[in-house]
Amino acid sequence: MSEPQHTAIPGFTLIAPTIWEQRPIGRGESFSNIEPPSLIIVLPWTGAHGRHVAKYTEAYQTMFPSASILCITTSTKDLCLRSSKRKQQRLQPAVAHILEHVERNNDRANILVHAFSEGGSNKAVELAEAYSQTTGTRLPCSAMCLDSTPGHPRYLRLCNALKKSLPPIPILNCTGLLVGGALLGGIWILYKCIKGHDNNVISRTRWRLQDPNHWDPTAPRCYLYSKGDRLIAWKDIREHVGEAVKSGAPVMDVCFEDTAHCKHAAAHPDRYWGAVALTWKRTCIDKEKRDSKIDLQKDTIEPVVSIPKPTTNYISDHNMAAATNKPTALRQSSDISVSSNTSSKRSIRVAASSFRAALKKPFRGWTKEALWAKSGLDDVYNFPTVRRRGAGEDSTDSHGH
């Protein structure tokens, strides 16, 4: 059993076609006294190269070294040509892996799902449905992060995605765009006139992400997207955010201004990984509240780091800036943040280690604003900005990585 060399993910073992596993690399350090996820399921964008996926898995390995990571990749053939039934058959090894993990960890099984683009989100809903059909229960997803997804099917944006995937040679690019555009147009008309506007992979994925039969509607969600994304319209994702809020899910809404498709972590690692960390912390707070039935508002829980009670199910990084009564720019340059000039020279391993240490540090003589910052609501801005060494030397793929 082997996969093409470019899809191999460094440090991972192939357990089935397109399904990769990495065992824990060490004993984990949790955020404050909060338990880290026991399993992280990473679902990359369509056709993702292994070395690009590794940038995200390495960050997770550093933040949560005690967590196992399951990575399931997607190809264009898998996304567009295979039926849901066939996709779910191919996901059975992943379902078996998750079942084994849940049985081994019992009540301590906490699963974080992170999906990228339409390929990753489609893989997520197929996995959830396959798990449900096998076990009769929902996929035990404790929290979900959605990067640059879900959108609506839009012809011109599909053509733009096609253009990015074509060779840079002008004649091949133009020829491929003409042929591919005509083919996409034919498929578009087929769906519009015969199968129906909503009976396509993207639209079905969109509503299946909200299906309470397959997802816990109370599990926190984090949407990471950009107004600069030329493949997925940010308003489409914002619309889905509103639908999730209406369903009662705690939602973290992070909208970037200028980043390209699935490039938010590279351009703004502070906001990106801070939002992911905060989403997981919300998961643990809710779980602790349910398990112990303690009212957080009465301050009866005394963690190492004081965490305010969530006052709303909808949080954006702009809400947080206002909550501290302190301008974002000022907070970024304050003493409690890490200098971007210094941290940009560090590896992501050092940065995340510092982040964990900061969250565990007792507070003595700090201002109210600083306490709020270190509670996690300010980490969206103060997580150290880092860049992997040699990252600028990597070639880019169709998603700009």
Image (spheres, rainbow, N blue to C red):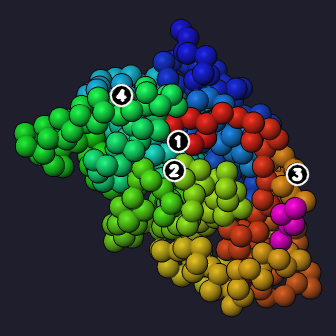
Image depth: mark 4 or mark 3 in front: 4
For mark 1, what is the residue? 399
Rendered location of residue 177, percent (x, y) = 35, 34
Rendered location of residue 53, percent (x, y) = 62, 36
Q: Are marks 4 and 3 in contact (CB under 8 Å)?
A: no
Asked whether residue 394 is in view, the answer is yes
For mark 3, what is the residue? 345
Pick the front one: 264 or 96:
264
For mark 2, what is the residue? 261
Circle nearer the N terminus (1, 2): 2
Pick the front one: 332 or 105:
332
- Of helix, strand and loop, which mostly describes the magenta segment? loop
As shown in the figure, which amino acid type bears the numbered disc 1?
His
Rendered residue at 36%/28% (across/down): 175
| 296 up-or-down from 350: above or below | below
Image depth: mark 2 or mark 4 in front: 4
Q: Which disc number belongs to residue 175?
A: 4
Quick check: 164 left or right of 359?
left
Q: CA distance from mark 4 to mark 1?
A: 21 Å
Q: Are marks 1 and 2 in contact (CB under 8 Å)?
A: yes
Q: Which quarter of the rendered picture does the C terminus lie within?
A: top right
As shown in the figure, which amino acid type bears the numbered disc 4?
Thr
Q: CA distance from mark 3 to mark 1?
A: 25 Å
Circle nearer the N terminus (2, 4): 4
